[in-house]
Image (cartoon, grey):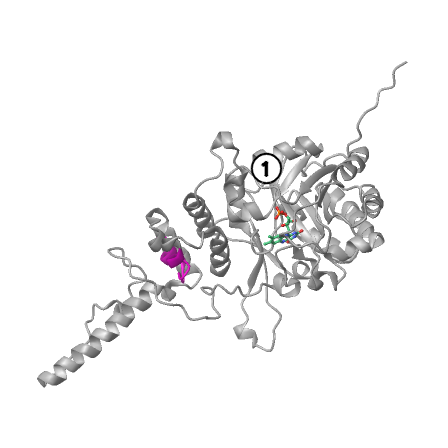
């Protein structure tokens, strides 16, 4: 008599998604906002993880639909910090596209308590395909709150968080719950941990193949991967690998080599999201193409300009002159002007108005400075001639026209540090202020 052995599989809930066979965008604070996720999807990412968001930040947020683009935005007032209520402005702590991300977005939670995790996860459960718990960030701001990699050392707590999420969010909302961990120094400790995690009802587990103290530049260690895969597979949980995966083709080869179900890409996708495109489909594209696609999504989704600028700095090679100039941009129209993305200009002008960036153009400053200089010179000439002078009424400075001059490209003026949207320094969102996230969770 032959015994039929069937591979167990934790059932994938009706509104959830199976991680098997997927090459996915990693969760990345700052670098994983909506436009980056849409760019990754455009180039072939199968699923996208949003940036880690702390439970407390989300729990007090308000959900609204942006009437201009249909995006769902979770907003909240920043903690007062001594300012008057009048000065406080709602900030968007999470934004998603219910159409283009439908069935593909995994929301990552930073948490250290089951109750808060559940409370926060319920806020977004109806809008996402899954909730993932960050159990890998090694930075003190995360671990000191008992979150991130600290959870690797408190397995009872991590297990209770995952069980609560499966019971109170995953089941009622019919979405998957998953976890992202790092490997631990000793394989037997990793083994003991993973053996417990896979019994919580999770549908997927991602392992970042670095130990908590390892820095991003250190090469990923893959010698525990097969062991972790086996534990996951025996429990019917999908296993994704992460760490030094750089492209779709390499991901497929690694999945084959290590027998894992999928692969997650972070830094390579941050620099050039077309890494999700296989060689057969065109492979890695020149950054100009990718920047165009990214900027288009930024404009469409009304992405915070400081965040756009931050990621463009990551995507644009430092030596390119045109792109170096673009880094001085103070609004979306500046970017489109310098980069000659004329097709994006009308929408850029509109979004600059919406985000109150209209008057901040570097070209506006340049034009205004020239107008002032002209006025002074005219005055002096007039005085010398014994007459009066009037500023030209058509001057862009006085007419208020003029973020953009399309006939020539003046050199961008040096931008002084400011505390506004146009500054590269990104104002913290409600979630970020409590997270102080870093790039190597
Ligand atoms: C900018 C940046 C932000 C990150 N933020 C998160 C995060 O929010 N949550 C998380 O679990 N990991 C985060 N990470 C870690 C990545 O998800 C990933 O595990 C790590 O970079 C290793 O993948 P890689 O070798 O492909 O870069 C972040 C990494 C980067 C570069």
- Secondary structure mostly seen in the magenta stretch: helix
283 sits to left or right of 364 = right
Q: Name above or below for residue 305 compared with residue 246.
A: below
259 sits to left or right of 367 = right
In the rendered image, the residue lying farthest to the right is 1
Residue with the mark numbered 1: 46
Quadrant including the C terminus? bottom right
Between 431 and 150, the residue placed more toward the observer is 150
Q: Ligand 1 within 8 A of label 1's CB?
A: no
Write the start and end of the magenta stretch as one range: 324-336
- Residue 233's quadrant in the figure? top right
48 sits to left or right of 286 = right
Q: Identify which residue is drawn at 40% across, 57% down.
A: 324
Tag 1 secondary structure: loop
- Residue 385's quadrant in the figure? bottom left
Residue 47 at x, y percent in the picture: 60, 40
């Amino acid at each position: 008599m032959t015994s039929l052995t069937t591979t167990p599989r934790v059932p994938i809930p009706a509104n959830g998604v199976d991680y098997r066979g997927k090459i996915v965008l990693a969760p990345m604070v700052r670098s994983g906002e909506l436009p980056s996720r849409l760019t990754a999807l455009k180039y072939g990412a199968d699923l996208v993880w949003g940036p880690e968001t702390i439970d407390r930040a989300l729990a007090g947020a308000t959900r609204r639909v942006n009437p201009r683009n249909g995006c769902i935005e979770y907003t909240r007032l920043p903690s007062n910090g001594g300012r008057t209520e009048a000065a406080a402005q709602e900030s968007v702590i999470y934004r998603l596209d219910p159409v283009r991300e439908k069935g593909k977005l995994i929301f990552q939670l930073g948490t250290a308590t089951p109750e808060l995790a559940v409370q926060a996860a319920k806020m977004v459960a109806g809008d996402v395909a899954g909730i993932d718990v960050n159990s890998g960030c090694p930075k003190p701001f995360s671990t000191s709150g008992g979150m991130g990699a600290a959870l690797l050392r408190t397995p009872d707590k991590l297990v209770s968080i995952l069980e609560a999420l499966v019971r109170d969010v995953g089941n009622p909302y019919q979405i998957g719950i998953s976890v992202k961990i790092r490997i631990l120094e000793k394989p037997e400790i990793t083994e003991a941990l993973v053996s417990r995690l896979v019994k919580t009802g999770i549908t997927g587990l991602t392992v970042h193949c670095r130990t908590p103290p390892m820095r991003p530049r250190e090469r990923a260690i893959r010698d525990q991967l097969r062991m972790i895969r086996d534990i996951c597979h025996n429990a019917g949980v999908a296993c994704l690998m992460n760490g030094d995966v750089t492209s779709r083709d390499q991901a497929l080869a690694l999945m084959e080599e290590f027998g894992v179900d999928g692969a997650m890409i972070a830094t390579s996708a941050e620099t050039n999201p077309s890494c999700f495109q296989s060689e057969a489909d065109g492979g890695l594209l020149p950054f100009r193409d990718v920047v165009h696609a990214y900027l288009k999504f930024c404009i469409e989704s009304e992405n915070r300009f400081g965040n756009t600028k931050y990621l463009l700095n990551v995507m644009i090679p430092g030596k390119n002159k045109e792109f170096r100039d673009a880094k001085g941009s103070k609004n979306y129209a500046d970017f489109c002007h310098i980069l000659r993305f004329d097709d994006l200009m009308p929408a850029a002008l509109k979004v600059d108005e919406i985000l109150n960036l209209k008057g901040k153009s570097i070209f506006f400053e340049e034009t205004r400075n020239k107008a002032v200089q002209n006025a002074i010179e005219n005055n002096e000439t007039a005085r010398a001639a014994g007459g009066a002078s009037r500023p030209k009424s058509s001057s862009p400075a006085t007419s208020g026209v003029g973020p953009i001059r399309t006939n020539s490209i003046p050199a961008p003026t040096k931008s002084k540090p400011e505390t506004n949207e146009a500054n590269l320094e990104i104002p913290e969102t409600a979630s970020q202020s409590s997270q102080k996230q870093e790039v190597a969770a």
